[in-house]
Image (cartoon, rainbow, N blue to C red):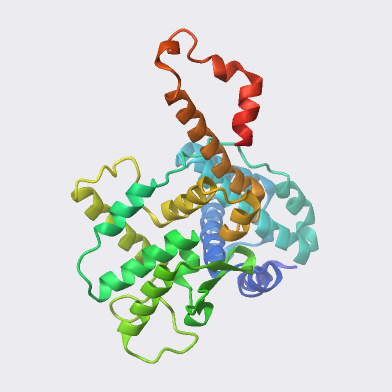
Amino acid sequence: MTQPNFPASVHHYFLEYLPRHKGLQSSTIRSYRDSLRLFLIFVADANRIGVSGLGFKHLDYSAVQAFLHNMEVERGNAISTRNQRLTALHVFFEYLGRTAPEMLPVSAKVAAIPMKRHQRPEMKFLARDEVEALFACIPAQDRLSLRDRALRMLLYNTGARVSEVAQLKVNQLDLASPARVRLLGKGSKWRTCPLWAQTAKALQAMLDERGAVLSPDSLVFVGGTGGGMTRFGIYKRIRHYGKLWEAAGVPASRTHLTPHVFRHTTAVHLLEAGVEVNVIRGWLGHVNLETTNRYAEITIRMKADALDLLEPVATRGASKSAWRDDAAMLVWLTSL
């Protein structure tokens, strides 16, 4: 493949390869596009040419290594950001190796660049009383409060990703008993989640208030102008209520409220209720069971902390950590 075909190759990559061959959703494609744009700008600057002048000869292994080094050392990006960009480059160079034979050696070398391990951020979630307090701070009933109550009920009920909620359509809802919702998750995989009666009622009230006859393809959540709520729009509304919550004197400082906090909260509360991990995996749409197991680790730590608090007062002090050194006790805790 010659240099003039490079722009056409990139065009085909985004319009054909990612959505059709890889089955990626638009949100993931946008993320890959942003990563590739940064990479191409970096390579063009390094070669002192415009992006339009780039060809396959400029996309070598050293360019990828230099780009990753620049991100970490020069720009000070987090390891998680570096890994995210590398994931996008892995997919792009895999595509180049498939479509341009001369790029196959480079593709193989880029594929061998490993992700870097990094400490996962602390997982934030709400306690049950915090969830109740959060819903109690919703203002008097009006169009926005009806929508926002339904939005938060759905987030907490299903643990849905914000992208899944933003693209939710009327035909994905079944509000008759037993109510349920079909969510389109990562990898274009569908899953069905049951809805509480109060969640279905809140969604129906919101849809009825809109007044218009809604087509099956109508978006469930819309903004003030009637257009669909974006991921960022949903984030802003959740943050708005987080600030109201804090202003009401509720101790929310330990949890920066975001849509994903609802997802974590749903998972932890399901585990606390005794729901099996594999069921929660299907509920949340996790591809990897390891992701779901992170919530199990949290609940085990919570049980261990509770056991520590229940330790008889007379035994506290010298032998306080004894149970932590007891292998049998740790096995028992893990089995709870």
Q: Confirm whether residue 101 shows in the render.
A: yes
Q: Position of residue 334 (x, y in %)?
A: 62, 33
Residue 173: give x, y in percent of width and height. 50, 77
Q: Residue at x 24, y 46 (%)?
A: 250
Q: Residue furthest top?
A: 318
| Camera-nearest residue between 277 and 26 | 277
Q: Is residue 239 visible?
A: no
> In this image, 119 relative to 239: left or right?
right
Left/right of residue 225 with respect to residue 167 in the rendered view:
left
Work out whether residue 308 or residue 58 is closer to the camera in this orientation and state it.
Answer: 308
Front position in the image: 242 or 179:
179
Picture residue at 64% right of the left edge, 35% below the top: 335
**Quadrant position of the N terminus in the picture:** bottom right
Quarter of the rendering occupied by the C terminus: top right
Determine which quarter of the picture holds residue 235: bottom left
Along the line of sight, the residue nearer the viewer: 141 or 28:
141
Task: Give above or below for 45 relative to 310.
Answer: below
* As drawn, 141 above or below 32: below
Query: Whole-percent x and y of residue 98?
Result: 77, 63
Q: Residue at x 66, y 59 (%)?
A: 92
Total marks drawn? 0
Q: Is residue 50 left or right of residue 211?
A: right
Q: Position of residue 171 (x, y in %)?
A: 52, 82
